[in-house]
Amino acid sequence: MSFSAEAFKRQFPLFAQGENARLVYLDNAATTQKPLSVINAVRDYYMHSSANTHRSSHRLARKATEMVERVRGQAAEFVNAASPNEMVFCRGATEALNLLAHCLCSGLAPGDEIVISTAEHHANIVPWQMAAERYQLTLRFVPDTAGVPRFDQLSTVLNERTRVVSLTGGANAIGLRPDLAQVRRQVQHTRSVWIVDGAQLAAHEVVDVQKIGCDFFVCSAHKFYGPTGIGLLYGREALLEAMPPWLGGGEMITEVGLQTSRYAGLPHKFEAGTSPLAAIAGLGAVLAFLARQDRGAMAAHEQKLVHRLHRALEASPDFHLVSQARNNLGIAAFVPVQGSAADLMHWLDERDIAVRVGHHCAQLLGRAGSNPVTVRASVAAYNTDSDIRTLLQALEAYCDFHRPTAGQLQRESGSGQRDDLTRLSLAHLASQRNWQDRYRELLRWGKVIRHKPEVRRRENLVQGCESQAWLVHRQEGGRHFFELDSDSRVVKGLGALLLSQIDGRTAGEIGALDLPRLFEELGLGKHLSQSRSNGFYALMRWALQQVEASLAQK
């Protein structure tokens, strides 16, 4: 078999829509797009066999039941489980990890220990924190360097009290793929159970839980081209048998008495209530879809893309690369030297390039590495060489636009100077022909706002902005003056717009302004994200509050 990214991509209808003709989708670590076969399977379930399972003998119910158990068998093959009884359907990896934290920890003794790492998704941290507090357990962490776990040193935190080891199979924030064989060698001689969070792993390589040697494995279908709302929990049959159920209700019982009930056998005792049947139908379709692909060739293609992206970012002085290409599932995480990660994300979005910005539900890793907010570009098999080229060209254009000029550097170095707001023309901003031009002009306005270390104090921090912003107010001769700074060029531009209207004016003049109307007339409310709009209004409220406070002191 061979692999063509272009041919693979043609199986995904979203990319064939007119509005997505230029889309470069690099947010695959968050969720992947769906092939037509998956979309059709969900639709066909509702059109031809919509009924509840196991509880009725009529034709539609039998058909739905047969579908569910057929997909369970496919899921067992997907991870190479020993039996379909070892496969539990859940809403996703997050629910599966919560189930395990509840069921495994309820039988532990105070002082027993759980081992996780600083690179885990919050879904593999918070449930264990909650269980540790509830049952007086101890959380321990794999040794790390700047937040990046040293999985080769896992054995140093394992001891006779270790009962659970729950580790990522691929870190969603930086793409780090642990050596699972190395982890197995360190865990296998302990009394602990070993859980692999495979939410990222399952999309990029063939999973074989028997070869891995883990006791539990969790993943979410929407990460590997399947529907949302359905995930898989694999567990060794003997361990699942010994675990108490998590949720109580229909489907997970065989008999209910006044005081006690008898639970169903595996895997149904962990599947209370009505299952997401349409999503299960879609899961079956994506498992069949992946079975037809050359998974090795897909992985090789993804690795080629992610290595190319890392090489380009490593060679650029304009970006700080957080991730590494080595042992990487398919993620490049970085921050721009100029502007903020949020600025860059909006720049890319304007060019129809979808990436993700934030801490990626991995705050422990971000704080330890001093990079709490990064840009994350994550590849999938339908991404092409052209996608990476387009991204790199957009990054280069961003750097060219934001690189400070010699004159700006001279202004930045000056102390005691005020920002020259007289260079800003509201008429020129409003006259821009389209939103893209207006947005670029607003970014140029942001260049007027100098870097001001003296302003960046806790008491000057404005709450409600997506990016950090500081605003200082003073009053002289009945007029109000402001000093602004921010890490974000967009926020600086919005702040410059605000100050161009209120700086140096009297309270009466400021009170007569309709600033929200100006914001809307410029089209900012329509085109900016909600968080950016909130940032403008947060700056406006803070400034007006200072003006009002000065009047109250008279």
Image (spheres, rainbow, N blue to C red):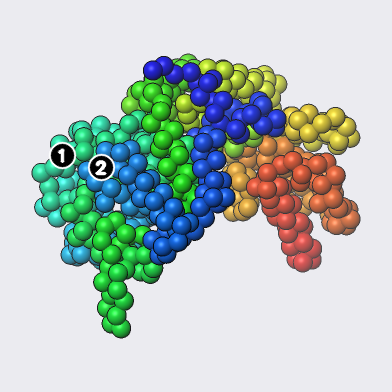
354 shown above or below 222: above
- Considering every residue shown, the one lying at the far bottom of the view is 258
Q: Tell me whether the residue at label 2 lies in contact with that at label 1, contact meaning CB atoms closer than 8 angstroms.
A: no
Q: Is residue 104 above or below residue 410?
A: below
Q: CA distance from mark 2 to mark 1?
A: 22 Å
In front: 103, or 272? Answer: 272
- Residue indicated by mark 1: 186
Give the residue type that dot 2 points to.
Ala
Please name the amino acid that badge 1 sits on: Gln
For this view, does 499 lie left or right of residue 196? Answer: right
Measured from the top left, where is residue 396 in percent x and y?
A: 60, 19
Mark earlier in primary sequence (2, 1): 2
Residue beneath disc 2: 81
Q: Position of residue 543 (x, y in %)?
A: 73, 53
Residue 337 visible? The answer is no
Classify mark 1: residues with Cα within 10 Å, few (<14), some (14-19) or many (20+).
Answer: some
**Residue in the picture at 71% in, 42% down:** 528
The residue lying at 85 percent from left, 29 percent from top is 433
Numbered label tally: 2
Which of 318 and 267 lies nearest the eye of the viewer?
267
Quick one: label 2, few (<14), some, or many (20+) residues within 10 Å? Answer: many
- Residue 292 figure quarter: top left
Horizontally, residue 507 falls left or right of residue 165, namely right
Please state, as top left, top right, bottom left or bottom right, where the N terminus lies in the image: top left
Residue at 80%, 46% in the rendered image: 519
In the picture provided, is 13 more to the left or to the right than 62? right
Q: Is the residue 435 above or below the residue 547 in the image? A: above
Residue 542 percent across, percent down from the top left = 70, 55
Secondary structure beneath dot 2 equals loop
- Residue nearer the viewer, 348 or 13: 13
Q: Residue at x 41, y 49 (%)?
A: 67
